[in-house]
Image (tube, helix red, strand yellow):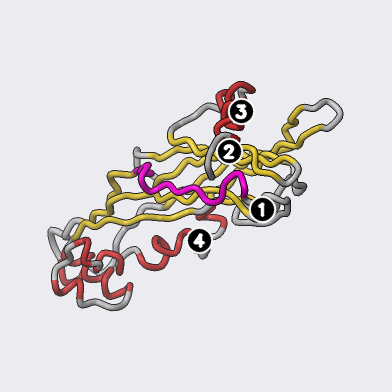
Amino acid sequence: MTISNLAVPVERIKPIGGRSSTATAGHQFDLTFRAEVKAPMLGKLMADDIECPQLEWNECIEWFRFDTVTQQWDFEGKIERNMYAHNRESNTFRNWHRSRYTIATDVTNHPPAALMATKREEDAKKWIARNGFSWNLHIRDIPQMGVLGGSGGGGGLSLVIGDTRRRVIYFDLGFKGQQERARLVQILETQQGRLTIHHLIRGDIEKKTVDELSNLERWRFQLRTSHG
C-alpha cells in the first residue's frame, strides 16, 4: 500500500467552542489521504494480505502555568507521544485501525460491484489484495481542553489542571517510510476560567514563533474581538 495526497484541508477544520465557552474548547480537523494497493503481477488468487504502512500520529504537548507573582507564563513541561502507538483503539483512529478497507466500499470511492458487495473488513481487504484499488480516507481528531480546568484526555494527564493555563500541541502526522507529512499547531489558553487563546495553525511552525509574546497577544486580541 502507498499513501498520497496527505493533507489537513482548511475547509475540514472546525472550531469547537469560543470566547464564551464554559465547558471545553478546541478544534476538529481531518487528516485526508489516498491509499493505493496495486494488483499483484502473479498469484492473484493467492494474494490475501496487504503490506500496510504504520501510521505515525506524533504529538508534542507543552504546558504553561501563569505565575501570579511575576505575572509571566512559565513552561511546566511537555509530553511527546505517537498517539496511534499509545492508543490505537481510540475513536480518533477507528477509521484507520478497524475500517480502512470497508471504507473503500463507500459509493464516493466508486468501487466495483464485487468490492461494494463485501460487508466485512477482512473480505474487503482480501478483494483489494487480489485486485488492487485506490480510495480516499480520513482520520478525524478533536483535540479539546477544559476551560474551567481539569485533567485527562487522549494525551494523558494534564500537567497543569487549574483554570489558568496554556496548552500547545505540535502535530506531526504521516506514515512510516512515506515522505509526505502534515504538520499543525494548536494553541489553547485560559485565564480564570475564560478562554483567551483559541488558535490552530497549519504548517511546520517553529516553537519560537509560537512562544513569541507579540504573537500570543495578537491571538488573544483576535479571540477578544471575535463573535464566537
Question: As displayed, is residue 63 above or below residue 161?
Answer: above
* Label 4, label 1: how far apart the Cα atoms are: 30 Å
| Residue under the image location 51 percent in, 53 percent down | 142
Which of the two residues, 35 or 52, is positioned nearer the viewer here?
A: 35
**Local secondary structure at mark 4:** loop
**Local secondary structure at mark 2:** strand
**Local secondary structure at mark 3:** helix
Question: As displayed, is residue 177 above or below residue 121?
Answer: above
Please give the residue where the numbered disc 1 appears in the rendered image. 22
Left or right of 91 in this view: 81 = right
* Label 4, label 2: how far apart the Cα atoms are: 24 Å
Where residue 148 appears, as percent x and y from the top left, is: 72, 51
| Residue under the image location 50 percent in, 61 percent down | 88
| Residue under the image location 19 percent in, 67 percent down | 130
Where residue 87 appears, as percent x and y from the top left, is: 55, 60
Please give the residue where the numbered disc 3 appears in the rendered image. 216
* Label 3, label 1: how far apart the Cα atoms are: 21 Å
Q: Earlier in the sequence, mark 4 or mark 2?
A: 4
* Label 2, label 1: how far apart the Cα atoms are: 17 Å
Q: Earlier in the sequence, mark 4 or mark 1?
A: 1
Q: Earlier in the sequence, mark 3 or mark 1?
A: 1
Please give the residue where the numbered disc 2 appears in the rendered image. 187
Left or right of 41 in this view: 6 = right
Q: How packed is label 3: few (under 14 Cα within 10 Å), some, or many (20 or more)? A: some
Question: As displayed, is residue 141 above or below residue 42?
Answer: above
Give the amino acid at mark 4: Arg
Q: Which residues are magenta?
A: 7-20
